[in-house]
């Protein structure tokens, strides 16, 4: 029987983060592109209401960030661009 994770077992956060806004049609398109690219699991972070995130990403959303490398892919991007970004 497989062992289940306990509360003391650290769970790593996804390396990919999609910064987005509420009611953002470009962000909805970005989600479709990530699905088409078969991107691995990612965390959606909404910048609304967070002054620091709004200052950094507010005018740029959607932005895909690879937290391991610190690299960011700004919109517009297509499935091919996402695959290339992930392969770097």
Image (spheres, grey):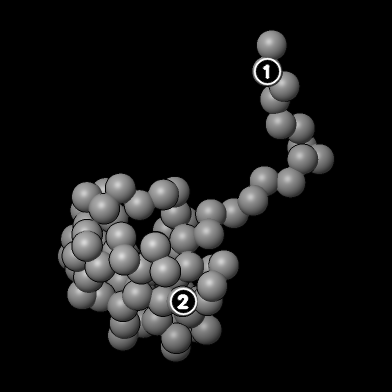
Decide if residue 70 is in sight here: yes
Which image quarter holds the C terminus? bottom left
20 relative position to 9: left or right: left
- Circle 1 Cα neighbour tier, 10 Å, few/some/many (<14 / 14–19 / ≥20): few
Above or below: residue 74 compared with residue 82: below
Q: Residue at x 68, y 18 (%)?
A: 2
Q: Where is residue 29, by image quadrant?
A: bottom left
Q: Where is residue 79, by image quadrant?
A: bottom left
Residue indicated by mark 2: 71
Task: Name the spot of residue 5 as percent of width and height, x first.
Answer: 71, 31
Above or below: residue 39 compared with residue 20: above
Q: Where is residue 28, by image quadrant?
A: bottom left
Q: Residue at x 25, y 75 (%)?
A: 75
Which image quarter holds the N terminus? top right
Indicate which disc residue 73 carries: none
Q: Nearer the viewer, residue 88 or 20?
A: 88
Above or below: residue 88 compared with residue 41: below
Residue at disc 1, secondary structure: loop
Q: Residue at x 20, y 75 (%)?
A: 76
Residue at disc 2, secondary structure: strand
- Farthest-out residue, bottom: 55
Decide if residue 21 is in sight here: no
Task: Name the spot of residue 22 as percent of width and height, x first.
Answer: 31, 64
Total marks shown come to 2
Task: Name the spot of residue 34 as percent of width and height, x first.
Answer: 28, 55
Indicate which disc residue 2 carries: 1
């Amino acid at each position: 029987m497989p062992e289940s994770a306990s509360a003391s077992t650290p769970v790593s956060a996804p390396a990919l983060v999609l910064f987005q806004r509420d009611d953002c049609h470009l962000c909805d398109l970005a989600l479709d592109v990530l699905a088409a690219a078969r991107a691995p699991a990612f965390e959606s972070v909404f910048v609304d209401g967070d002054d620091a995130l709004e200052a950094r990403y507010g005018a740029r959303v959607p932005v895909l960030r690879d937290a391991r490398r610190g690299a960011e892919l700004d919109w517009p991007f297509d499935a091919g661009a996402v695959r290339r970004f992930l392969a770097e």
